[in-house]
Image (cartoon, grey):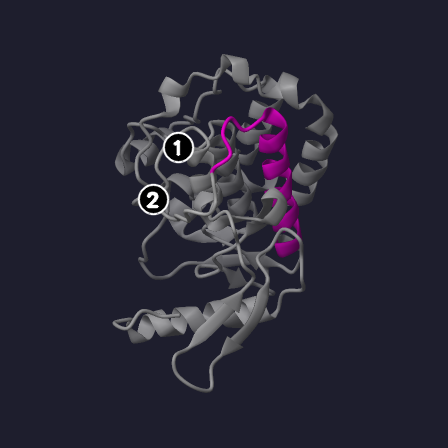
Amino acid sequence: MLKDDASESDRKDLMSELRLMKELDAHPHVTELLGCVTKSEPLMVLIEYIPYGDLLGYLRKSRGLNDTYFEDPDIKPQTNLTSEQLMKFAWQVADGMSYLSSIPIIHRDLAARNVFVGAGETCKVTDFGMARDVLDDNIYQMRSKGRIPLKWTAFEALLYGKYSTKSDVWSYGVLLYEIFTIGGSPYPKMDGRQILTSLEAGYRMPRPQHVDNKLYDLMTNCWKHDPNLRPSFEDIRKTLKEMEDHHKGLINLENYDDRLYVNVDDLAE
């Protein structure tokens, strides 16, 4: 529901999100719309129950950090997530995005905070407030200066406002960093201006020491300067499926240094 003091633009945003969700078929890795109330007040959007909150909080709580988004005293956080679970999360999000990109829908705000963790630890892409259903040329040109999730936004979207499925792929690469660092904050200790300048100069986040080069290659492929050189979500989904039996070699949690990722910033951008 909208808050009591919600603006008219908040209402329009929720209605836009609702219209988009109505177009989606049920998919195991996309949040399901159950119903809505639009003929009377208050405006309501009903979605499936999500017992574990968002993925970012789930990752952080697993190593004793606070979850600033979701708290349920009846749900105890899982401690010490395994490499197999982390790979499963990565594949499930890629599977959900493969479906959305086939419609095509551009999400524009893909991040661990916008993935829910449902029953059986099933990851579901959610929050379509910024998403666009794009049928013309699969690209969306942003013309207004809205708030942008800078650390997750593709280079071409930051500079020119150009969004596409391939800009979502860039965001997915950042989401992989969040998953594999178990809730680490991207570009630690860098502000927005530094990030943009560094990206223009070719900088990409370095490989976490406990992550194998094959997984890091997948991340950096998502961050290719030319969007056309980035893999599709279907390619990513297949690649991760092929890797799943080798999870322990790909993510060596015995080499995971919690101190590198413990001082996470709150995601205010």
Q: Residue furthest top?
A: 255
**Position of residue 147 in the picture relative to residue 104 (left or right):** left
Q: Nearer the viewer, mark 2 or mark 1?
A: 2
Decide: is 164 above or below 9. above
Residue at the location (59% across, 41% down)? 228
Residue 84 in percent (x, y) is at 63, 28
Decide: is 230 above or below 245. below
Residue labelled with disc 2: 68
Residue 18 in percent (x, y) is at 50, 70
Q: Earlier in the sequence, mark 2 or mark 1?
A: 2
* Residue 232 visible, this angle: no
Residue at the location (70% across, 29% down)? 244
Residue at the location (45% across, 51% down)? 109
Q: Secondary structure at mark 2?
A: loop
Residue 221 in percent (x, y) is at 57, 31
Give the quarter of the figure containing the N terminus: bottom left
Foreground: 68 or 187?
A: 68
Dot 1 amino acid type: Pro
User: Dot 1: few (<14), some (14–19), or many (≥20) neighbours within 10 Å?
Assistant: some
Distance Cα–Cα, label 2 vs label 1: 17 Å
Foreground: 235 or 261?
A: 261
Foreground: 223 or 39?
A: 39
Q: Which residues are magenta?
A: 77-100
Q: Residue furthest front?
A: 74
Residue labelled with disc 1: 186
